Image (cartoon, helix red, strand yellow):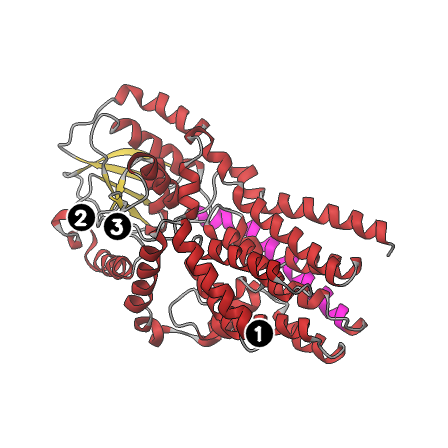
Amino acid sequence: MSTPAIFCAIMLLVVGHCLVRSYFLLRYGWAGGDTYYHFVLAEQIRIAGIAQLINKRFVVPEAVDYPPLLPFLLSRMPPGYVRRFQYIAPLSDTLTLIVVIAAAYWWWNPGAALISGLVYSLTPYTFDMAYSLNPRPIGNLFMSLVLIALVSPAPGIWPIALAAVCGCLVLLTHRLTAQSFAACLAIFALFNVGYAIGVTALAVGLAVLVSRRLYLISMKGHISFLRAIGFAKCSAVNFYNNFIRIVSGNPYILLIVGMGIWGSVFDLQRQILAAWVMTLLLLAQLWPFGEGDRHFANASSSVALLIGGSGAGGYAWVLAALGMACGIMLIGAKMYAYPRLAARGAGTLVMPTLREGCAVVRAVYQHADRPLILVLPQSLSYQVMYFADARVVLASGGTGAGLAYNWDLSARLGQFGLNGLRDEEQPDVVMFLDSVRIELPHAQWQLLFQRGGLSIYWRVGMSIQAQGHVGACTCAVLSN
């Protein structure tokens, strides 16, 4: 394949990659679940600032200690453009793809650049990271830049400076990626202990300085989170299922050994890439705190570069082609399944019916205090919190105490229904899908909205405001 043809293929790959990652946003307008938690935080930062922020949208108020970069940036942007902000995710992942392609071209040749780009683009993990706005694709972009800076054959101060700055941004962006960053720097110390210590110290120092010491609060919350929930989950870890999630998220892991057998002996650069991959694989497989396989999502760039630059023979490229075929099938299956899962309550997309119901609630309560809403299934709570401008019967999933509270809440609801709620948890509104079985005493609850499998009830005896504005508000919210 000639070099001009390779460059044309790379250009088509980049455009196609961005369109595939943007598909749900282009098709449905709104996607994801955690996205709307960050939108709510951004609203509150605009009003109260970011220091010592208390998120009162949960029934248990949250002292916010999540990495501040994404909600802070969102708070600086005009609220009227919030829907367009979601494209930050696919654009960030497309930038990561470009970085991977550029690194492979710089280190090796155009053919390696194309192979690395194809592997990265057809990794199911990278699709899951980037179809909705969340800190993961942004953290992965910075993590990839750290990798490339440290593996770069050009010695000197600039690779250390780039790795330190991008490491700082990782720390300020996403907790789990920060854990991956720390683990990879620890293993990198086997190759260059001075670089590893220097990058770590500079990254942490910059994070504290840039955030005006706010990162210290975030780091303390991160440590408390791990201590509070980690080992309670150890007994529930199913290592076989975890490995299946890792393979289905990045099927190329099965090819690494084969490509090493058929390929040439790894040089130092490829040894570092392989060490990065194996570190995150072991961390993902053995991580006892839940969502461990997401650590291996952060290995997507290193896996792509390792395969693209392996110098392996024809058999290995046959295996790589099989991995790409698996990637196409798995990503296609996700694009087919996620809208259907959303209709059953998964927080993958925001279905139009849910937004319409939230618009009705928002119109009804626009002249009153924010209503407290019980959302079932709970995976839709962040979406409802944002679109209904409401409080929810839930605690933040970003703290150990919050997760423990939510597990207890789910157990009480499952066993006793609404009778399992405490006084402070008694909702003004109950919103649930048909897939959830719940009995409401008709003497206490009145139907407010019912459509497309979604039912919304409000408590009898409460004064409903602005009923005449429901239609207008619904249209306004749905057109946003």
Query: Looking at the rendering, which quadrant does residue 110 occupy?
Result: bottom right
For the view shown, which residue lies furthest in the right direction?
2
Residue 369 at what x, y percent from top left? 20, 32
Would you say the residues marked 2 and 1 are in contact, meaning their CB atoms lie under 8 Å apart? Answer: no
Amino acid type, mark 3: Glu
User: Upstream in the sequence, badge 3 or badge 1?
Assistant: 3
Question: Can residue 346 be seen at all in this image of the molecule?
Answer: no
Disc 1 is placed on an element classified as loop
User: Upstream in the sequence, badge 3 or badge 2?
Assistant: 3
Of badges 2 and 1, nearer the viewer stands: 1
Q: Residue at image x 70%, y 60%?
A: 116
**Front-most of 118 and 371?**
118
Amino acid type, mark 1: Asn
Q: Residue at image x 55%, y 78%?
A: 190
Residue 234 at what x, y percent from top left? 35, 75
Quadrant location, the C terminus: top left
Q: Main secondary structure of the magenta part?
A: helix
Based on the picture, tell me whether residue 336 belongs to the magenta stretch: yes
Disc 3 is placed on an element classified as strand
Judging by the rendered image, the residue that carries numbered circle 3 is 62
Judging by the rendered image, the residue that carries numbered circle 2 is 425
Query: Looking at the rendering, which quadrant does residue 259 occupy?
Result: bottom right
Residue 425 at what x, y percent from top left? 17, 48
Judging by the rendered image, the residue that carries numbered circle 1 is 192
Would you say the residues marked 3 and 1 are in contact, meaning their CB atoms lie under 8 Å apart? Answer: no
Disc 2 is placed on an element classified as helix
Asked if residue 285 lies left or right of residue 372, the reply is right
Query: What's the magenta region?
Result: 316-342
